[in-house]
Image (cartoon, rainbow, N blue to C red):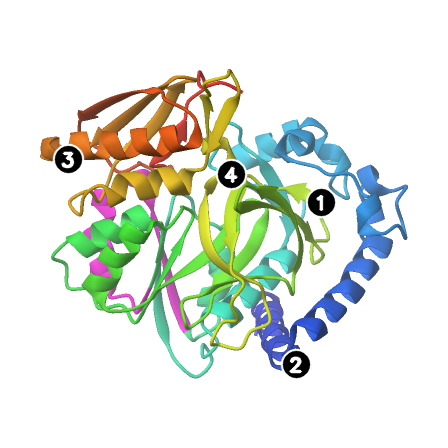
Amino acid sequence: MSAALMLTLSAFWRSRARAARLRTRSDLLRWQSQRLARFLARTAPRAAAFSHLSGHPLADFPLMDKAALMGAFHLYNINGISADSAWSAYDQNGSIGKFSVGASTGTSGNRGLYLVSDPERYLWLGTLLAKALPDMLSARYRVAVMLPRGSRLYDAANESGRLVLKFFDLTEGLENQLAAVSAFRPSVIVAPPHALVALARSDLPLAPRQIFSGAEVLDPVDRREIEARFAVTVREIYMATEGLLGVACSQGTLHLCEDCVAFEWEPEGELVTPVITDFTRRTQMMIRYRMNDLLRLSAKACACGSPLQAVSEVAGRCDDTFRLAGAEGQLILVTPDVIRNAVVGASRNITDFRAAQVATARVSLTLPPGLDNELVPARDALAALFLRLGASPEILAATAPLPAPQGGKLRRVIRGNGAGA
């Protein structure tokens, strides 16, 4: 058995054991507090940015975000590796010394870097498998992963003997991969929602037993279409450059990975933005890191019995919250979820759209060809929403082709660069 496989299986069993042992919310938070305190005292100070904070409580650590991380990248990793060195390694073979280098897709125009060691990669993989496929050792799976970029992480999964995992690179074009996915005969598919919708709309002979959505916001309209086609519950995997943050249980409820990450919350209306501290990292520290996501937390206990925080919805990105001019000159904030609900709720025929704020008093709305009759209802629904919130921007509505992204992420609600601060 290889070292990679041993580390992956070890993480798998530890994650399963924690889930069995930490059955109440108080047990989980007490255990998390102990692990977090140990991490902050022993591990965090190994990065120069936190060397003076050994033994301090989490509240004493400064908030950070992608701009801070990329502005002083060398201070946040234990070897003092600079961003320039990491980018150079990323463009060559994706490794620098004993560390792997990864990067975000740069959907918002600002790409982020991350460094991980091999043990960290296998810890991440084992934890993910324990949460997503807990019966992996007693059942055999053929897993198709459709994402914009591959990873050495997948090699260890194939070594388990229980998984056959194949990566399908979406940067080569979504349409070019559909037949290949079908020929692979996957029992599990992991893909962004736009790729899952394309599979659902095809006439390919696919019969997956499990489907996981990741890398993009899973809109309710897409969920319904995918589940209707394949007759399985779509489960979300919430992960980003910043790490593995959540995995949906067998009930379909997204649970945060609070056994690896401590979460703090910044309110954004009825939604929250997570501030994360990953206490499993040993190479690049992510401490009180402000994410760019908007979540709707659930107050209900999940039927699966997990004490991990349940999430009702990953609603979108902070960057895509519209900031519209109000009647008295103030900025009116409108989050992506309510914009999406207004457009889709205007007509059952609307299953795709693009809404973009192009100025503080101007919004564009695009529907696919053939939906000309839905333009007025959709525009009126948006106008009514904005007016109710105190704004009345000009709305330019039209139909046009809405191609699937080639290698990037699908964003239906977008705030453009000229749309205000």
Mark 2 and 4 residues: CB-CB less than 8 Å, in contact? no
Kind of residue at badge 2:
Arg
Q: Quadrant of the C terminus?
A: top right
* Residue marked by disc 2: 21
Mark 2 secondary-structure assignment? helix
Residue 31 is covered by the magenta coloring = no
Q: In the figure, residue 6 lies in which quadrant?
A: bottom right
Q: Tell me the tag on residue 104.
A: 4
**Label 1 vs label 4: CA separation?**
19 Å
Mark closer to the chain start, 4 or 3: 4
Residue 170 is covered by the magenta coloring = yes
Of the pair 100 and 138, the residue shown nearer to us: 138
Circle 1 packing at 10 Å, graded few (<14), some (14-19), many (20+), is many
Residue drawn 10% across the image and 33% down it:
373
Of the pair 83 and 66, the residue shown nearer to us: 66
Q: Which residues are magenta?
A: 163-188
On screen, residue 138 above or below 170: below
Kind of residue at badge 1:
Arg
On screen, residue 147 above or below 322: below
Mark closer to the chain start, 2 or 4: 2
**Label 4 vs label 3: CA separation?**
36 Å
**Residue 336 in view (yes/no):** yes
Mark 4 secondary-structure assignment? loop
Q: Tell me the tag on residue 288.
A: 1
